[in-house]
Image (tube, rainbow, N blue to C red):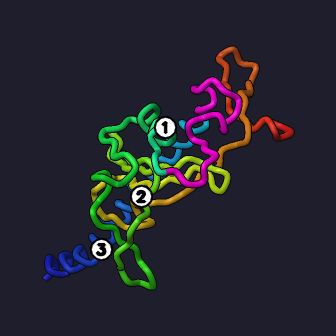
Amino acid sequence: MAVAIVGIIAALVLPMVIKNYQDKTLDAALKREKQTLESSIAALIVNENTDDYKKTMLYTYAEELTDYSNSSGAFIKKYLKVSNYCGDNNGDCFASKYYEYKDGDKVEYTPTYKGACASLKNGSSICMEPENPKHGVKLLLDVNGKKGPNVYGRDLHVYEITLPKKGSLYRSTDDPDWDYKLIDINSAEP
């Protein structure tokens, strides 16, 4: 009798424990990926030896591009660890189906694969569209690639990063083991 009660309790609790663990793992992966992408983008003006993000490959004056190979595609290939570059569409970098929850119901979700897309060596998938006069750098990110749960808001995320107008390096300490950080030179203080 005691074994049956323990079995019933385990059957009720175990799915919640697994879901909580998976949510924490996906959240940690999202934070890691966002930090990596934001750091790579922030360092772009230094890496490209310029003082203005508008002079980099992640900015275009065209509001609509049909070819991303010289903009976000070039950035992905040069600064991210790519296992499979899919070009200007999904190719086979993302899962075949995604879902989202609307009003408690699970419905099929169709992401917009706009920009250059790739599968990264860490298992995530990304589509990146460069900044233009109307929007910042747009990102579609699946933190675990084709693996499930393939649900918008859990492992699939859409977000945007706005590039600063200009950038500069600021030495934040007098320590000989220098610590430089990127700042917006238009702001009053670093």
Q: Residue furthest right?
A: 188
> Helix or strand or loop: what does disc 1 sit on?
loop
From the viewer's side, name the closer residue of 124 and 27: 124
Q: Mainly helix, strand or loop, the magenta region?
A: loop
Which residue position holds label 3? 13
Q: Which residues are magenta?
A: 44-65
What label does residue 113 carry, if any? 2
Describe the element under mark 2 as helix, strand or loop: loop
Residue 168 location, quadrant: top right
Amino acid type of disc 2? Answer: Tyr
In the image, residue 162 sits, relative to residue 182, either above or below, namely below
Q: Is residue 57 magenta?
A: yes
Amino acid type at mark 3: Val
Position of the C terminus by quadrant: top right
How many neighbours does mark 1 have within 10 angstroms: few (below 14), some (14-19), or many (20 or more)? few
Tell me the CA gap for discs 3 and 1.
Answer: 51 Å
Q: Nearer the viewer, residue 61 or 189?
A: 61
The residue at 20%/80% (across/down) is: 8
Q: Label 1 near label 2: C-beta < 8 Å? A: no
| Left-right relation of 178 to 149 | right
